[in-house]
Amino acid sequence: MTTTRSHTVEKIGGTSMSRSKELLDTVLIGDRSEDALYNRIFVVSAYAGVTDSLLEHKKTGEPGVYTLFAGAEGGWVWGDALNVAAERMQTHNATVFADDGARQTADRFVRERIEGVRSCMIDLARLCSFGHFQLEHHLLTVREMLCSLGEAQSAFNTVLLLNLHGVNARLIDLTGWREGVQHDLDECIRRAFADVELSRELPIVTGYAQCTEALLRSYDRGYSEVTLSRVAVVTQASEAIIHKEFHLSSADPRIVGTGAVRVIGATNYDVADQLSNMGMEAIHPRAAKSLRQASIPLRVRNAFEPDHEGTLIRADLAAQSAQVEIVTGLKNVFAFEFYDQDMVGVKGYDAEILEALTRHKIWILSKTSNANTITHFLKGSMKAIKRVESDLSNTYPNAEITLRKVALISAIGRNIADPTILSRAIDALAKVEIAPLGIHALVRKVDLQVIVEEADFELAVTSLHRELIETRQLAAADDLSQLNAAA
């Protein structure tokens, strides 16, 4: 395969993949023909909801095949869940293919993969019924095997659909199906693309890749973006593109209104990192690292607005002036306050706190501390956080630990060093009678974090967006009008 930095590597998310027919008219084909169809590589996610049914629901935690298998204790209830997942996958096939022959081909592919996984899981369950073999030692492998089913289906279907429309698409199956040897991710990609001619073939790549790094263990459900980044790096792409069902905007339009938000035209990877910390991922931070180090720009586009250039993210893009670019945040955040007067002057006192949070897989959004109080702002289940509280109560019986639900809002920009931003933020909240519970204005001016009561979340986001972004836009427009008039 030639690597001349003339091609792009593009990822399509699960929600967008579920709108396959629309994708043909926008991202996949659109008004392209002949040579314009090629010099692109697509990394695809599973259809919306498929991975949830195979593993567990990402948001609600509702058990899927994997969760039921891991906790079955000799039962076979997971088999019924696998049947439900198979039916769901075949329902997707029916929505993608109007042609009976194509649909039957897609259904056969799903059945082969499902039954292969079922046989493997049955054999494993029987093997682990003997005391010499412990199921927990194999659960990660089962989890990876199950999640690969969704990406394999969507990639296979996309190739079939494109072939039906006269495009020379080619399946690049990185799931390791029936392969006996594992390689690291980069080697998997090099082997898969060894004989690909990008100028004449359109590779469709599974978002999941079986490799020695164990993507699901390392990156959880963000693995497809890691695959995107490594494919871009290994093939020396000119640009990486993520297609979403929305634009990367200055705020959530459902909160501040569609007329108030603006699409972010360009920003840098620093801002992308802050967004990831807020759960508003432009790209997984580990994937961003690979692209940044290889000097590959990332573009985030709306899959269904093909004429819009979207948001360009580059490592070397500094702000021309201090400004807030995005106001975002999270509800259901737990303020975990640890107070102990004995901690004064003790170095590394919070090591036990961090170890407990890590052990119970709690996501730390932010942290503050003073002489005798350390507060972590956490995202996770109440059950897991209560376990942390119990562990630390035993370790530090004299400490006072309090837990309360709050909302965390972040005003983010490449450079927010303007000293008026903090005062304007406080004033904007005061105007709507919101008293912040806390404000974190760090020395490195890329984000301003505001803690408020959960009930004040939407109003606070709207007020901060109006003052820090909309008002500035109006002022900039007035300045431009005056310059034009003077000219």
Image: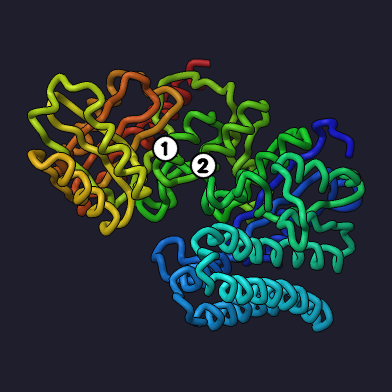
**Left of 346 or right of it: where is 15?**
right
Residue 264 spot, x, y in % from top left: 51, 37
Badge 2 element = loop
Q: Mark 1 sits on what residue?
A: 326
**Left of 400 or right of it: where is 141?**
right
Precedes in sequence: disc 2 or disc 1: 2
Residue nearer the viewer, 176 or 91: 176
The amino acid at mark 1 is Ile
The amino acid at mark 2 is Val
Q: Mark 2 sits on what residue?
A: 263
Residue 255 spot, x, y in % from top left: 35, 52
Q: Quadrant of residue 423?
A: top left
Residue 390 spot, x, y in % from top left: 19, 51
**Left of 477 or right of it: where is 86?**
right
The residue located at (52%, 20%) in the rendering is: 318
Q: Residue furthest front?
A: 132
